Amino acid sequence: MSGFARATAPFARRLLRVTGVDPLGAYELLRAADPHGPEPSPGQFLMLATAERWGGGVDGRPYLPRAFSIARRRAGESHFLLEDVGPGTHRLAELRAGDALWALGPLGRGFSAPAAGKRAILIGGGAGIAPLAILQDTLGREATVLVGFRDAAHARGAELLRGARVATDDGAIGHRGPCTDLLAAELGRDPDAVVYACGPPAMLEAVRAMCASLSVDAQLALETGMACGFGACFGCAVPRLDGGYLRACVDGPVIDAAALERVPEAVGAHP
Ligand SMILES: Cc1cc2nc3c(=O)[nH]c(=O)nc-3n(C[C@H](O)[C@H](O)[C@H](O)COP(=O)(O)OP(=O)(O)OC[C@H]3O[C@@H](n4cnc5c(N)ncnc54)[C@H](O)[C@@H]3O)c2cc1C
Ligand code: FES
């Protein structure tokens, strides 16, 4: 497999202008003008913070920026899929067109392109589908897309991807059950495919274990908790199969599944 060109982040954070925040079922799609930012490779992320109301004041916490996958680049805009799970994502979701947004990045190591002739299977759970959208845009060939959500409101997120097959926990849309059921069927038909995955830890671990048992190449985008995002704090350390640790922000967030013994339960923020 070869890499997509990895963008190097400018040294300092930059101020972006929000162009819109659109509801997408249970999610928000945040769009911001970033005409001078480097083109990210799929799987890279930005550290985001609102320019106003990011202090720990009345509603508590923020201060540190939060990590978000770049979901799409279009006409000088960067798009982000937000799930409002706490004060940081809540304040980002409250932004409106014209508001200012601090951004640092693109950061991290993204996905590698599949070898010639290999089919790509993209599998995502919840807001973890975000980096798969820019990957689908970049691949330039048809990929199989499998996505899983807890219910119909969250399943609207599937609109971010073309031709996605959907699974829901409650069976409201598509297959009833985990999206890894769909992956098992696909790999049964084509064990020579390459798998690209992002989502909650239990889903990533199921993908890792399935691909290991079938000797299928897999790349996992880990969304472990991050503080700095650029390698300085070791707050994002993940154990390696051969001993030692990976820092998810600089060695990942996309990690070769074969490098991990298992996906730690604490990794990933998307229920
Ligand atoms: C590389 C990367 C890419 C990401 N991309 C996206 C994205 O595209 N869309 C999106 O909605 N979110 C994404 N996330 C997750 C996002 O950064 C967190 O949801 C956000 O930091 C939560 O901040 P908060 O202040 O809203 O909530 P907090 O109060 O910080 O957290 C809310 C709840 O989620 C848990 N939590 C938060 N972050 C994590 C984490 N990283 N690991 C485990 N548990 C966590 C907390 O324990 C708490 O229960 C990404 C994370 C990483 C590292
Ligand atoms: S988040 Fe600081 S080293 Fe990775």
Image (spheres, rainbow, N blue to C red):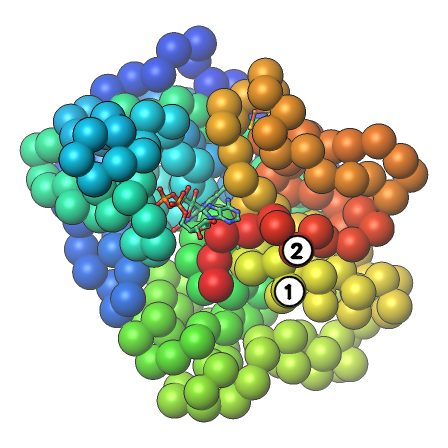
Image quarter of residue 37: top left
Q: Position of residue 216 (x, y in %)?
A: 82, 62
**Residue under the image location 38 percent in, 11 percent down:** 12
- Whether residue 7 sits left or right of residue 12 in the image: it is right
Front residue (pair 259, 141): 259
**Residue under the image location 33 percent in, 49 percent down:** 86
Q: Point out the residue furthest to the top here.
A: 11
Q: Position of residue 118 (x, y in %)?
A: 73, 59
Q: Position of residue 39 (x, y in %)?
A: 43, 29
Q: Amino acid at mark 2?
A: Glu
- Whether residue 36 sits left or right of residue 267 in the image: it is left
Q: Point out the residue furthest to the right here.
A: 242
Residue 125 in view here: yes
Q: Which residue is mark 2?
A: 265
Q: Amino acid at mark 1?
A: Ala
**Residue under the image location 43 percent in, 13 percent down:** 10
Q: Residues within 10 Å of mark 2 (few under 14, many from 20)?
A: few
Front residue (pair 216, 258): 258
The alpha-carbon separation of the residues under discs 2 and 1 comes to 7 Å
Q: Position of residue 204 (x, y in %)?
A: 65, 60
The disc, 2 or 1, on the residue closer to the chain's N-terminal end is 1
Q: Which residue is mark 1?
A: 202
Rendered view: 212 above or below 12: below
Rendered view: 11 above or below 223: above
Residue 137 in view here: no
Image quarter of residue 237: top right
Quadrant for ligand 2? top right
Answer yes or no: do the residues labelled 2 and 1 have beta carbons within 8 Å? yes
Of badges 2 and 1, the one in the foreground is: 2
**Residue under the image location 59 percent in, 16 percent down:** 232
